[in-house]
Image: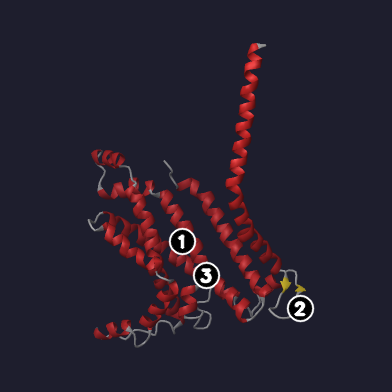
Amino acid sequence: MTALAERAPVRTRDRRRRRNDTRAALAFLTPSAAGLTVFILFPSVLAIATSLFHWPTYGDITFAGLDNYAELFSARSDFGPALLNTVVFTLLIVPINLVLTVGVAFWVASSRFRQLYRVLFFIPVVTPSVATAIIWKLLYQPDGVLSWVAGMFGATPPNFLASPSSALLSVVVVILWNGFGYNMLIFSAAIDQLPEDVLAAASLDGAGRWRTMFQMKLPLMTPAIFFATTVTLIQSFQIFNEPYVMTAGGPGTSTITVVMNVYQTAFQSGQLGEAAAPAIVLFVLILVVTLVQWTGQKKWVQYE
């Protein structure tokens, strides 16, 4: 009886502590849940609903069903070229960005001026992308700096932004330059966190420079590589500023992207329902690619 009497206050205190913990957890989670609902879930559901209607900026709203999605693949729609260009942008930007940033991060880490280099390489990231695109557009002009430099060597460069064969690559260069510093900084932080004792042990075992690089350092950096790959992939699918400012999608449709197609349909043609459909398709595409990445990372990312 005495033991039971002593346990009763303990159980009461446990229940009171769990109740207080639950209240504290709800208090911390409520702002995030409210923000997620208002700014993410509700607009997403509204976009899906909008894609099922003919929704002009001015005029009557009528139910369209899946007609807006079927229209995306018609001959008069720019969605096909936009989707193809978006995929090409992504396939070019992601691997080039990762290879360059990993290489430069290792080079910067070995320099005694690494702090200065990291600041310099990060400056384009904090520079507004619209301003960057305008500057590069001026550089690419036939009478711009690049043409002047090429003329000094007797070369005649093409009109970079006016040719369908060079416009997309010219925009890719600008996007790479603009986003280069972000991943470089991610990889620099990962290099600084590499365990010195493991690398020293590899050196004592006779591992050479390149073997240490490919069999020790890069595997230890796979969590950072996975993060950078995912972020860069999503950003590449959502490219808008640089091609819109530099080429407005031209010449023809050679640099139009899906996000630009959404913008033009919604705010230039005034068709909100038709604009929501490609946005939903892009959302599903990014979701599928991200899920595939997340599933596949278990096979190559090493967290320990």
What numbered label is drawn on residue 32?
none
Identify the residue at image location x=43%, y=66%: 93
Instruction: Tell me if label 3 and label 1 are in contact, CB under 8 Å.
Output: no
Outermost residue toward the left in this view: 112
Look at discs 2 and 1 and give the one toward the viewer: 2
Q: Is residue 143 left or right of residue 87?
A: left
The image position of residue 244, as x and y in percent, is 50, 77
- Rendering quarter of residue 76: bottom right
Nearer the N terminus, badge 2 or badge 1?
A: 2
Nearer the N terminus, badge 3 or badge 1?
A: 3
Above or below, 5 against 269 in this view is above
Nearer the N terminus, badge 3 or badge 2?
A: 2
Identify the residue at image location x=33%, y=64%: 121
Q: What residue does disc 2 label?
A: 60
Q: What SS does tag 1 mark?
A: helix
Q: What residue does disc 3 label?
A: 86
Please rate how many residues cluster around mark 2, counting C-alpha atoms within 10 Å: few if below 14, some from 14 to 19, many from 20.
few
Please rate how many residues cluster around mark 1, counting C-alpha atoms within 10 Å: few if below 14, some from 14 to 19, many from 20.
many
Which amino acid type is shown beneath numbered disc 2? Asp
Identify the residue at image location x=63%, y=59%: 38
Instruction: Tell me if label 2 and label 1 are in contact, CB under 8 Å.
Output: no
Above or below, 219 against 82 in this view is above
Instruction: Tell me if label 3 and label 2 are in contact, CB under 8 Å.
Output: no
Please rate how many residues cluster around mark 3, counting C-alpha atoms within 10 Å: few if below 14, some from 14 to 19, many from 20.
many
Above or below, 256 against 214 in this view is below
Which amino acid type is shown beneath numbered disc 1? Thr
Q: What SS does tag 2 mark?
A: loop
Identify the residue at image location x=40%, y=72%: 174
Let me know if residue 107 appears in the view: no
Separation (CA) of disc 2 from disc 1:
40 Å
Q: Is residue 172 left or right of residue 32?
A: left
The image position of residue 257, as x and y in percent, is 53, 73
